[in-house]
């Protein structure tokens, strides 16, 4: 029997109220100078984020906020870790997530995808929807993040989708699985954990990937060591890497391929429009053109 998300996936935008099943929590935490009723009123107007489950929040732990039609995952109020449009839950609202879906331009039908870092599940949900024949494994170190999965409509574990609570570096080192695609987007309250940006970690990633397999890593633009991380990937993948900045340059996506060229032709970009006609995949051709521009500039 198909799971409930499979049954409703094509009607996501039409049945939002049914999908969330009344799980909205509009409580918010106290803010100095404003009463709870003041903040609730501002939240209803979309002028203040509604902070869900404040009583269970410890410093540095994840929490959810609602601002208008957007639901966000935070570790603090200074940054957004993940974001979902509640009127279109499959849409990728943050540019770096769209860039990480670029693997489809090189391999539109992977047998196995692994993701390090769940966040709000934006990539996991879209891959689950676009690739019905692909096995997807998500590795997330924080049980607290995993416990928020229903608020972001992350699919339940089933025969082709699962979330494992463990350290991504340990999983990559110890697992015998051979993914076609490895997406690395692991962050905590302090940024990118050191074990997910070491030469040893990238070497394990390269070793485990299938031939011509792709790794795409999201690097935060504010990290002063991001170019060092990219250099480690470049060495581990024998130069088959490409760094592509996101819109605004806030993040960089590093695309690395095992033993195969990263060349991208116009025909591959045209094919992606034929292979993926879903509205939520309409961004892929423009991502392809940005990658081609980076290749032409020699951003290896």
Image (cartoon, grey):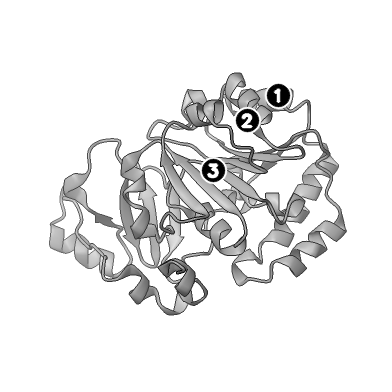
Element type at marker 3?
Answer: strand
Label 1 sits on residue: 236
Disc assigned to residue 115: 3
Instruction: Tell me whether the residue at label 1 lies in contact with that at label 2, contact meaning CB atoms closer than 8 angstroms.
Output: yes
**What is the distance, in whole Å, between disc 2 and disc 3 at their CAs?**
12 Å
Q: Position of residue 129 (x, y in %)?
A: 56, 64
Q: Position of residue 194 (x, y in %)?
A: 49, 23
Q: Position of residue 179 (x, y in %)?
A: 63, 41
Say above or below: 173 vs 128.
above
Element type at marker 2?
Answer: helix
Residue 300 placement: quadrant: top right
Q: What's the residue at 55%, 50% (across, down)?
A: 136
Say above or below: 117 vs 20.
above
Side of 159 relative to 279 (left or right):
left
Q: What's the residue at 17%, 62% (across, down)?
A: 38
The residue nearer to you, when weighing 4 against 78, is 4
Instruction: Bin the neighbour count of mark 3 within 10 Å (Cα to Cα): few under 14, some 14-19, many 20 and up.
Output: many
Residue 48 placement: quadrant: bottom left
Q: What's the residue at 47%, 40% (across, down)?
A: 139
Instruction: Bin the neighbour count of mark 1 within 10 Å (Cα to Cα): few under 14, some 14-19, many 20 and up.
Output: many
Disc assigned to residue 205: 2
Q: Quadrant of the N terminus?
A: bottom left
Say above or below: 70 vs 213.
below
């Amino acid at each position: 029997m198909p799971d409930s998300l499979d049954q409703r996936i094509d009607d996501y935008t039409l049945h939002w109220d049914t999908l969330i099943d009344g799980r909205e929590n509009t409580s918010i935490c106290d803010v100095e100078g404003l009463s709870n009723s003041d903040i609730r009123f501002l939240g209803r107007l979309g002028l203040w984020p509604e902070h869900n489950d404040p009583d269970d929040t410890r410093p540095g732990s994840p929490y959810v906020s609602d601002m208008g039609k957007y639901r966000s995952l935070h570790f603090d109020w200074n940054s957004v870790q993940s974001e979902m449009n509640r009127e279109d839950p499959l849409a990728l609202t943050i540019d770096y997530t769209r860039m990480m879906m670029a693997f489809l331009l090189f391999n539109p039908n992977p047998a196995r995808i692994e993701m390090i870092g769940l966040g709000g599940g934006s990539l996991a949900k879209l891959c689950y929807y676009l690739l019905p024949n692909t096995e997807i494994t998500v590795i997330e170190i924080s049980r607290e993040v995993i416990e928020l999965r229903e608020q972001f409509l992350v699919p339940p574990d089933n025969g082709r989708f699962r979330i494992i609570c463990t350290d991504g570096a340990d999983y990559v080192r110890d697992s015998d699985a051979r993914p076609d695609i490895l997406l690395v987007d692991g962050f905590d309250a302090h940024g990118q954990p050191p074990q997910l940006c070491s030469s040893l970690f990238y070497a394990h990633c390269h070793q485990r990937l299938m031939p011509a397999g792709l790794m795409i890593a999201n690097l935060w633009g504010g990290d002063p060591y991001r170019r060092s991380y990219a250099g480690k990937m470049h060495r581990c993948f024998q130069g088959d890497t490409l760094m592509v900045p996101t819109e605004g340059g806030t993040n960089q996506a590093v695309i690395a391929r095992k033993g195969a060229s990263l060349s991208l032709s116009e025909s591959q970009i045209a094919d992606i429009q034929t292979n993926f006609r879903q509205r939520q995949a309409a961004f892929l051709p423009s991502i392809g053109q940005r990658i081609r521009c980076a290749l032409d500039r020699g951003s290896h």
